[in-house]
């Protein structure tokens, strides 16, 4: 059941939905939804069906959710949108002035794609950070987070498949720490 709850949280974040929005769509109070997502209240099959409907997915898809497959679909969708934008954009050089329509569109697509990717990793990093945030030495904190992060089943699988490399893991952890220490 923990995998299903993790899937629900990851899918919600990937779909850019807040707990408040989920609660409203399910017709329950926000604290009730939070308790469902955190496993403090049991998840009935009826509630799981409603959650799947909100996500526009089947119950089976929610239960067997793979963020890698989801992100690949998002990337393909983003690439398709970029191609359509490219076909409609003005040329890069026009009458001596450089137009950045294509570049700006590409940048926005990449940013829109990467934001949910980082939110997926935040779901993994948040609990690790909560346990280790007492460490004041940033280098030691980064090393500890990196060790635990790369041992996470999802992350380890992505590393083994070549989806993540050492440099990308460092980048993810550094950006997470920048955001986490601002709060």
Image (spheres, rainbow, N blue to C red):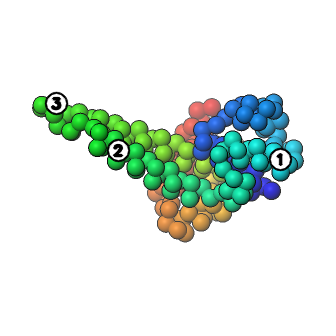
Q: Are marks 2 and 3 in contact (CB under 8 Å)?
A: no
Q: CA distance from mark 3 to mark 1?
A: 58 Å
Q: Quarter-wise, where is residue 178 in the image? A: top right
Residue 171 at least partly seen: no
Q: Earlier in the sequence, mark 1 or mark 2?
A: 1
The label number, if any, that marks residue 97 in the structure image = 3
Dot in front, 3 or 1: 1
Q: Quarter-wise, where is residue 98 in the image? A: top left
Residue beneath the point at 82% across and 40% down = 35
SS at mark 3?
strand
- Between residue 48 and residue 164, name the one nearer to us: 48
List the residue tagged with mark 1. 46
- Between residue 15 and residue 6, name the one nearer to us: 15
Residue beneath the point at 49% across and 66% down = 162
Q: Quadrant of the C terminus?
A: top right
The label number, if any, that marks residue 84 in the structure image = 2
Residue 80 screen position, x and y as percent: 40, 49
Residue beneath the point at 16% across and 34% down = 94
Residue 159 screen position, x and y as percent: 54, 65
The label number, if any, that marks residue 19 in the structure image = none
- Between residue 90 and residue 157, name the one nearer to us: 90
SS at mark 1?
helix
Crowdedness near tag 1: few (<14), some (14–19) or many (≥20) residues, C-alpha within 10 Å: few
């Amino acid at each position: 059941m923990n995998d299903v709850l993790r899937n629900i949280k990851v899918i919600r974040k990937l779909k850019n939905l807040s707990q408040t929005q989920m609660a409203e769509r399910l017709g329950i109070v926000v604290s009730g939804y939070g308790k469902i997502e955190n496993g403090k209240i049991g998840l009935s099959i009826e509630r799981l069906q409603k959650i799947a409907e909100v996500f526009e997915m089947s119950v089976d898809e929610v239960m067997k959710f793979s963020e890698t497959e989801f992100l690949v679909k998002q990337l393909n969708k983003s690439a398709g949108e970029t191609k359509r934008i490219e076909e409609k954009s003005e040329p890069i050089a026009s009458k001596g002035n450089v137009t950045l329509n294509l570049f700006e569109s590409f940048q926005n697509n990449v940013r829109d794609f990467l934001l949910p990717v980082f939110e997926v990793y935040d779901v993994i990093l948040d609990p690790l950070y909560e346990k280790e945030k007492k460490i004041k030495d940033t280098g030691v904190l980064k090393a500890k987070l990196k060790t635990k992060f790369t041992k996470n089943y999802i992350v380890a699988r992505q590393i083994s498949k070549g989806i993540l490399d050492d440099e990308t893991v460092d980048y993810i952890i550094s950006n997470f720490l920048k955001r986490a220490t601002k709060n």
